[in-house]
Image (tube, rainbow, N blue to C red):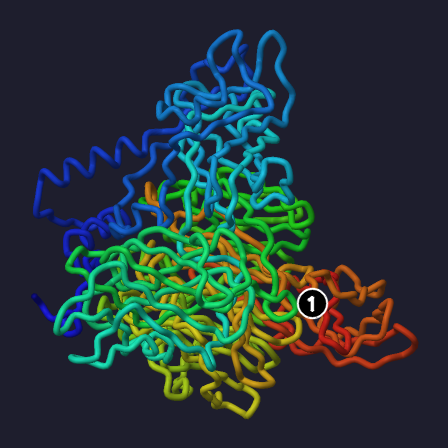
Amino acid sequence: MSTPAWALPWDATSFSWGDDDMIRGFALSVFRRPFRFGSRGLILLALTATLVALLPLWSSGGRASAGPGALPMADPTAPPPAPHHQAAPASAMEPAAPTLPRDGWTATASDHETARGDHRPLRVLDGDPNTMWHSRWSPTAAALPHSITIDIKETAVLSALVYRPRATGTNGRIGEYAIHLSADGVAWGAAVATGTLADDTTVKTLSFAPKGARFIRLTATTEAGGRGPFSSAGEINLLGDPGTAASVVDLPREGWTASASSFESARGAHAPAAALDGDPDTLWHSRWSPTTAAFPHSITIDMKTARPVSALSYEPRRIGVNGRIGTYAVTTSVNGTTFGTPVASGSWKDDDTLKGATFTRTVSARYVRLTATSEAGGRGPWASAGEIRVSGPAAPAAHGVWGKVTGFPLVPVATAVLPNNKMLAWSAYGIDRFGGSNGYTQTAIMDLATGRVTQRRVDNTGHDMFCPGIAVLKDGRVLVTGGSNAERASIYDPATDAWASTSDMNIARGYQAMTLLSTGDAFVLGGSWSGGGSAKGGEVWSSANGTWRKLSGVPVTTTMTADPRGAYRADNHQWLHATSNGRVLHLGPSKQINWISTSGNGTITAAGRRADSPDAMNGNAVAYDIGKLLTLGGATAYENVKATRRAYTVDLNGGGTPVSSRTGDMAYARAFGNSVVMPDGKVAVFGGQSFPVPFSDATSAMTPEIWDPATGKFTRMASMAVPRNYHSVANLLPDGRIFTGGGGLCGACATNHPDGAIFTPPYLLNADGSEKTRPVITGGVPAHATNGAQLAVTTDAEVSSFALVRAGAATHSTDNDQRRVPLAFRQTGAGAYEVTVPADPGVALPGTYFLFALNAEGVPSKAKMLTVG
């Protein structure tokens, strides 16, 4: 028998991004470079699958037909989609949550068609996508909304509804929807998800926060194509526990003890206490010498006092593979003697990633027992654990609250908050994939007042805006550059809801960085991901005439990381902070900091290093105060290396050389995460991976954190429902809440996340979850204010501070537009204040801002929006 404690480490599901054929395939689809393959058979198979997957979508032309069976018409004007390279790892092709078996399930509906076809609700459970449930259309059509309810006959953790549209015809494809859960089929509560689906045949996964339920109801409120008052579904499946509980926080483990059914001591110190010691390199292991203990194996945690518990997380041993738990059950007890029926059960994959178990219900318990009934790899009768944590419900006033998951008709890879209380989002030429240079982009608009999402394909600019640079202009318009159509530049005007072209850049780019300058012009740098070549030096867009000017004195070379892939990865997603007189501080992700002047031909001057930070690609930089920035997370290379927990402050206020200092570490290592500055100067970080791999959800950080500049420490917040990694976004909203969404865009993969959710930070919440009384700005905020203007602002109650926060535009973990500017003010009367906008446009950069008033408790008002400059 092999010795389990000393087994060599391995990962059966690991994926190498060093595969030469995949890299060459990537280069062909994006850069159109020549390449060769090692296997013609595999290439033919891949091309066939790709062409089948990317057949043009069909449309009925927008006219309602007499019934659900009308054949769609092809759109002869639609450009053919380009091949999409298969960049996703194998693990991304299967959902993290299991598809639940449908044996014995039943379905009912608000109505269904029987006179002209057998379209009962049970058809969504029969395994045949060619049959369907359809709302009644004869002799008269039933009006919207239509709903279908599934009874799974037992309580189970549910996390997503998988909706397959009807296989033939178009009528009844669901557009806007809502999902409700119930334990008894009577009490339903608020929707756990709402959103809008694209009008196509693709299978849609509608995610929501994992929760125990017996009944699930899908309600359609519109038909996707507006063809009539119809709803239909070919098949519906449900996903179970993804192992990532939502709206929970880890409980502190001080004083806890653990016991086990057996543990190894003769050939190693593997007592159960090792699973609680905070060191993942130590482990509990079942006994294997001198004789091996047989399954099942259990480890029981005594929390010393009863408390509400909602989930358990399991970190497999870090070194070696033997004993990784496969099938498991979790039970609880108040006395350590009587354990009830399992509150969670399932099977974990045979890899080294963090696992989780969401309880079917929150229970009060002192003891939590994890029982292993098999070894994940079938290597032997062993069980082990590096670390075990127990989570309880989040406390709103300490950890914040998540709203429902909102579905988008695309993966929101890029977003910009607009002056009209709406948010612009877009993906690529496809709603769930990218590749090539197709000349059009799928976009969506979210109305922040209603939550409603609408979709539009933008063709008129000839620009596939995937992986672009973004800058919010001084008048609130959004400038988008490069990406898949690497030389193009487009502008969205929220006042007219229209897109237009501006001049092409001199240098074709993708993954470049952009920022607006204090002059109102826009600066761009880097971007070797697209457009060929690697000399992606700086250039400036003129707000006066819409043309581009190359900066021969600003080469990209000194701003690059030491990524082993070279410029292709080393000049991506740079952190740029605009300052006075058209200057820009480049402060990462390379460890080298640089001052950039954009006057004339431009100059670039070294400005030291970011303290002891290494390169931090796919990390963040956030301006939380005047001349003060926080950088956090990232990794030494774009992918396949460990991310960091480190964070640093960079202070520009001491003169010409920025001063960098290490501040407190995050609890979780993150690359591909997103950070947002809040009105009170704190910074919230969401998502990311401890080992960044594009399109993967492995090693996800599901717990947001908030950094406090007063203490330099991060505090954990309520956990998210959906992973947010590569191709995710986050934005501060005008009401002080935060939107985060997206992730994926890898075609037919399970890690596409065409959705988002809004987080309510603790500063808005009472202990019972109700909203705190906010101050209200009642007047004195004009639509436009010049730099140096004094505003006569009135409020309904006393306030203690004012702050401007610039509306952000996020993509690929970068938002160079956001910044917080605390304002000088003086009180002139009861609820009356003279508030001064900074005179320097390098401090209050031109553009759209949220003006917040905050009371003495740090509770922000809802913002008034104004344009500065």
Along the viewing direction, whichever of 308 and 582 lies nearer the viewer: 308
Along the viewing direction, whichever of 226 and 701 lies nearer the viewer: 701
Vertical order, 159 against 811 (above or below): above
Identify residue for label 1: 767
The image quadrant where one finds the N terminus is bottom left
For the view shown, which residue lies furthest in the bottom direction? 654
Q: Is residue 849 visible?
A: yes
Q: Would residue 657 appear left or right of 182 to someone viewing this image?
A: left
Vertical order, 70 against 510 (above or below): above
> Would you identify the image quadrant in which residue 168 lies?
top left
Q: Residue at x 48, y 73 (%)?
A: 303
Q: Secondary structure at mark 1?
A: loop
Q: Would residue 755 appear left or right of 95 to someone viewing this image?
A: right
Q: Residue at x 26, y 70 (%)?
A: 262
Residue neighbourhood size for the residue with mark 1, other residues' Cα within 10 Å, grouped as few (<14), some (14–19), many (≥20): few
The image quadrant where one finds the C terminus is bottom right
Vertical order, 769 against 305 (above or below): above
Q: Horizontal and vertical percent for residue 155?
A: 49, 43
Q: Horizontal and vertical percent for residue 795?
A: 85, 68
Q: Horizontal and vertical percent for residue 559?
A: 36, 75
For the view shown, which residue lies furthest in the front direction? 337
Q: Would residue 188 appear left or right of 360 to someone viewing this image?
A: right
Q: Horizontal and vertical percent for residue 602?
A: 44, 75
Q: Is residue 558 visible?
A: no
Along the viewing direction, whichever of 600 and 612 lies nearer the viewer: 612
Q: Residue at x 42, y 69 (%)?
A: 389
Could you tell me the amino acid type at mark 1?
Ala
Q: Residue at x 72, y 69 (%)?
A: 860
Picture mark count: 1
